[in-house]
Image (cartoon, grey):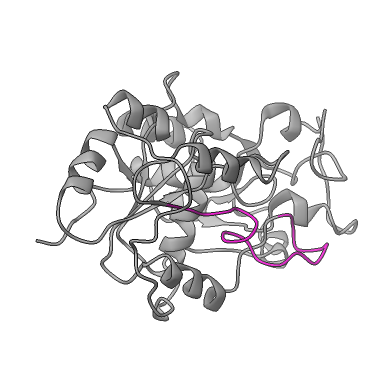
Amino acid sequence: MPITLPGPLIDAAALLRLQAAAGPLVVLDCSFDLADPQAGERAFAAAHLPHAQYAHLDRDLSGPKTGRNGRHPLPARAAFAATAGRWGIAPGVPVVCCDAQGGPYAARAWWLLRWLGHAQVAVLDGGPAAWAAAGGAFVAGAPATDAAPLPPYPALPPAMPTIDAAGLLAVLQRRPVLDARAPERFRGEVEPLDPVAGRIPGAHNRNFRDNLTPDGRFKPAAQLRAEFAALGGAPADWVHQCGSGVTACHNLLAMERAGLAGSALYPGSWSEWCADPARPVERG
């Protein structure tokens, strides 16, 4: 019987059952550290979920940078389709993504696979810590090779909406923008990663960590629904952004968990927006 994932999130106990069941399953460890891009790979080599493969934010989950398109531009669809095939992902194959940082990098992989048209993908709620708490084992060493590489993922219509900088500038007064960065970065008080501090004018702030409970799991769907509904507007009106289009995917995942799917991602986010001095900036 084909494995069907329960939704955008999967708990560790359910993943344990899936790993014990027959059938294809791809697990992607997306752990990453923006300040040390090799840290995630080192941690993966030391300990990772059985049968997991490592997905590197810069190499696998982003495209080439030009200096004007942000720190983590989207990969070309054909390039990411080839990456997905290399991981053993084909239509119908369930994929579980995880990271040890609260889910932002796993959410990026989840969003990219959905964008590619892949429906059977979920994020491990609580990450490796939840896996350990459920009695899951860890292994060390090189990535798993038991998922046979496949041809590139077939071309399907994008299943997740996006908007580019020019499009966002044209609708800035009409569509609400949600910024997933920390409040002090949103206000422009500090900027550790990009050359300009500030925010897109009129944006609202919801730090992606506000989606989590103290134990690192996502809040219940009803609580997330109430919190996002309090911001106003229909889900399809919202544009999500952050520093480079990564943590914004965490808010998109949380909205999907809440039953509020349909928002757009601005992939370039603040790092692209502030690269053009002609674009307006707001602070305070």
Where is residue 152? Give x, y as percent. 44, 78
Frontmost residue, 109 versus 117: 109
Q: Residue furthest left?
A: 1
Most distant residue in the right direction: 277
Determine whether, in the image, residue 272 is placed left or right of residue 114.
Answer: right
How far from the left and from the top, in percent, is residue 270? 74, 49
Picture quadrant where residue 62 is located: bottom right
| Quadrant for the N terminus in the image | bottom left
Classify 86 as above or below 10: below
Q: Residue furthest front?
A: 141
The residue located at (81%, 35%) in the rendering is 191
Say whether residue 50 is left or right of residue 208: left
**Residue 250 makes an appearance in the image:** yes
Q: Is residue 261 magenta?
A: no
The quadrant of the picture occupied by the C terminus is: top right
Image point (18%, 57%), residue name: 3
Find residue 76 and report its image quarter. bottom right
Q: Nearer the viewer, residue 260 or 160?
A: 160
Q: Which residues are magenta?
A: 53-71
